[in-house]
Image: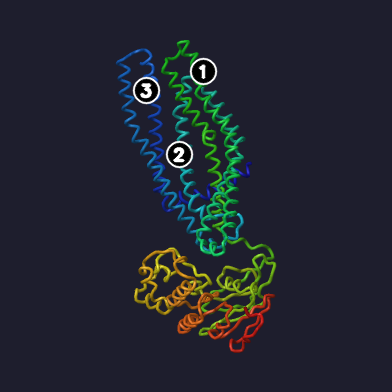
């Protein structure tokens, strides 16, 4: 349990500390000070109201009309003064929560996109649904953390403000209050600790359920083509049932905890009266003191019983701390540390592209894909990579991009910004046609005339007219055919003119005429291209052919000498 508490506290600090020591720390701390001052003001008003209420009830019971109406006026004045303070307290709290969420979300996004962490964590089994953690868990965490922090501060202020009043009324009542709250807290923590794990699982199950629905929406056309509605429906319902099953356990434990906490809260109303009533009957206290004792007892008990009153929400908050804490820790070092005896492919940045004695293994190191490969892709030439499925063609491209490094040897390549990758299914961003053309350099300023000219070069001259212009935002994945998307990807290449272009079956959806036209456009640029493909028609656009056999061996030949009838050609 102590180890769990230590880890929980460490994760909490990992999430919270950066903001309060960031460039916005003085603004954040200033708002927090304002909240503390407002909390002091609210508690001061509550203390004053306790005395006013005491005299109010005493004047009412003794039928002192003039004193009653005087106190009534005072009471109304205090309420008028307290209303804007209470409202302002809630407003400042929400504003601080908004600023915190904005900063913390941007902080997580910076780490998420740094060093390709968004790619690396996909293979981490301990991190599920990072999108949910960034978009939803951070929002809930900042509001909850600020709420609990203020509740703790408010409880301390309330305890200091009212325990003296309670002690002055009855020492026995004060002692009973402390014992009652301590026992209640111990029982609640012991009884409700199971809720922490259930809430953690519930957040994960709900995220899995939403992710599957989003996945169906994004792949609706493919599912419809395959007629996969029944299987998709089963998978969605399975995830829903897992969420509901866990939620059923959750509400069962909440019910069990509720039996105790509800009874605990009900008895609060009886204890002060049971202890103070004999004093009133004996004439030792005024009637108004009974009401004041009730108020003071409730305030002090509320301050001491924070865990009891909010444990169900607190268990959810602890689950959020665990999810965000583990996420933050992984983002700090997304790539697993090198294990003893594990070798990695080295990378050296240069203007040329070459591989020196590269042996490429699968990520689990169980299989050798390519053994001792050495080659150089010279300027003005093209390299075509061939081989059966599973021979390591795509893995080799990932290694060049730095996405795979399991193995040995050296890869010499330019900075990644000088290499453009064109996959078989191009990535269509959420944005305008202009953004699609400029991606990934969305900040580039290129004249419209040049964009129109490039579209004409890839046989998409009529596309702007068809969709409504360069700046219209559409769902491009569904608007454009795969062939049009591939031509749009070539338009990016012609605009960017990188040192190297790697084409992974980038013309598979095009007819031979369009394929030839696009390669001709690339050949007149200074870009060096590396292609992975299955068509024999690609041979004439490349100078070298790298053939992968699938057993680790390979063969590098000149394209004109390559046999077009090779049996392993796909």
Tell which of 56 and 472 is nearer to you.
Answer: 472
Identify the mark nearer the N-term, 2 or 3: 3
* Residue 236 picture location, percent across and down: 57, 53
Q: Residues within 10 Å of mark 3 (few under 14, many from 20)?
A: some
The image shows residue 304, relative to residue 475, as above or below, that is: above
On residue 421, the disc is none
The image shows residue 78, relative to residue 24, as above or below, that is: above
Q: Residue at x 51, y 63 (%)?
A: 221
Which SS class for mark 3? helix
Q: Residue at x 38, y 18 (%)?
A: 57
Image quarter of residue 197: top right
* Residue 148 picture location, percent across and down: 48, 40
State how far apart marks 2 and 3 are (Cα). 26 Å
Tell which of 555 and 73 is nearer to you.
Answer: 555
Residue under numbered circle 1: 275
The image shows residue 105, relative to residue 148, as above or below, that is: below
Residue under numbered circle 3: 52
Identify the mark nearer the N-term, 3 or 1: 3
Q: Are marks 3 and 1 in contact (CB under 8 Å)?
A: no
Tell which of 362 and 455 is nearer to you.
Answer: 455
* Residue 231 picture location, percent across and down: 60, 57
Identify the mark nearer the N-term, 1 or 2: 2
State how far apart marks 1 and 2 are (Cα). 32 Å
Which SS class for mark 1? helix
Quadrant assignment for the C terminus: bottom right
Residue under numbered circle 2: 150
Residue at the bottom extreme? 561
């Amino acid at each position: 349990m102590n180890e769990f508490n230590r880890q929980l506290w460490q994760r909490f600090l990992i999430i919270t500390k950066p903001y309060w020591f960031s460039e916005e720390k003085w603004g954040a701390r200033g708002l927090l000070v304002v909240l503390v001052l407002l909390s002091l003001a609210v508690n001061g008003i509550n203390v004053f109201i306790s005395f006013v209420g005491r005299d109010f009830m005493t004047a009412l019971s003794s039928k002192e009309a003039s004193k009653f109406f005087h106190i009534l006026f005072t009471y109304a004045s205090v309420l008028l003064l307290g209303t804007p303070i209470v409202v302002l307290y809630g407003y400042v709290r929400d504003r601080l929560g908004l600023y915190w969420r904005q900063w913390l979300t941007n902080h997580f996004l910076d780490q998420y996109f740094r060093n390709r962490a968004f790619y690396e964590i996909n293979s981490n089994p301990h991190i599920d649904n990072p999108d949910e953690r960034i978009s939803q868990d951070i929002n809930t965490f900042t509001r909850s953390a600020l709420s609990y922090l203020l509740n703790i501060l408010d409880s301390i202020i309330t305890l200091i403000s009212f325990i003296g009043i309670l002690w002055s009324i009855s020492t026995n009542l004060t002692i009973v209050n402390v014992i009652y709250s301590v026992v209640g807290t111990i029982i609640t923590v012991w009884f409700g600790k199971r809720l922490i794990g259930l809430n953690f699982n519930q957040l994960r199950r709900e995220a899995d359920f939403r992710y599957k629905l989003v996945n169906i929406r994004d792949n609706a056309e493919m599912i419809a083509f395959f007629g996969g509605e029944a299987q998709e429906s089963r998978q969605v319902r399975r995830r829903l049932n897992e969420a509901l099953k866990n939620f059923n356990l959750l509400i069962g434990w909440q019910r069990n905890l509720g039996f105790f906490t509800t009874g605990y809260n009900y008895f609060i109303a009886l204890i002060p009266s049971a202890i103070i009533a004999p004093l009133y009957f004996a004439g030792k206290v005024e009637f108004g003191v009974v009401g004041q004792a009730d108020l003071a007892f409730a305030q002090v008990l509320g301050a001491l019983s924070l865990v009891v009153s909010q444990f169900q929400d607190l268990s959810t908050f602890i689950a959020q701390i665990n999810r965000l804490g583990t996420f933050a820790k992984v983002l700090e070092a997304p790539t697993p540390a090198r294990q003893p005896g594990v070798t990695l492919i080295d990378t050296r940045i240069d203007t040329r592209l070459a591989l020196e004695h590269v042996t490429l293994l699968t990520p689990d190191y169980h299989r050798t894909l390519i053994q001792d490969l050495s080659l150089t892709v010279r300027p003005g030439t093209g390299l075509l990579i061939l081989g059966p499925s599973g021979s390591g063609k795509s893995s080799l491209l990932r290694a060049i991009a730095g996405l795979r490094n399991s193995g040995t040897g050296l890869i010499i390549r330019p900075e990644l910004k000088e290499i453009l990758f064109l996959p078989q299914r191009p990535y269509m961003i959420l944005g305008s046609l202009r953004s699609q053309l400029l991606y990934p350099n969305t900040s580039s300023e290129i004249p419209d005339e040049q964009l129109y000219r490039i579209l004409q070069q890839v046989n998409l001259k009529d596309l702007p007219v068809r969709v409504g212009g360069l700046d219209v935002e559409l769902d491009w994945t569904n608007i454009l055919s795969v062939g049009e998307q591939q031509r749009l990807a070539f338009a990016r290449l012609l605009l960017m003119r990188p040192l190297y272009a790697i084409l992974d079956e980038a013309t598979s959806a095009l007819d031979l005429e369009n394929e030839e036209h696009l390669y001709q456009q690339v050949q007149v640029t200074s870009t060096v291209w590396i292609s992975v493909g299955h068509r024999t028609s690609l041979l004439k656009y490349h100078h070298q052919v790298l053939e992968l056999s699938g057993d680790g061996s390979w063969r590098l030949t000149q394209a004109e000498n390559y046999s077009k009838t090779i049996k392993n050609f796909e």
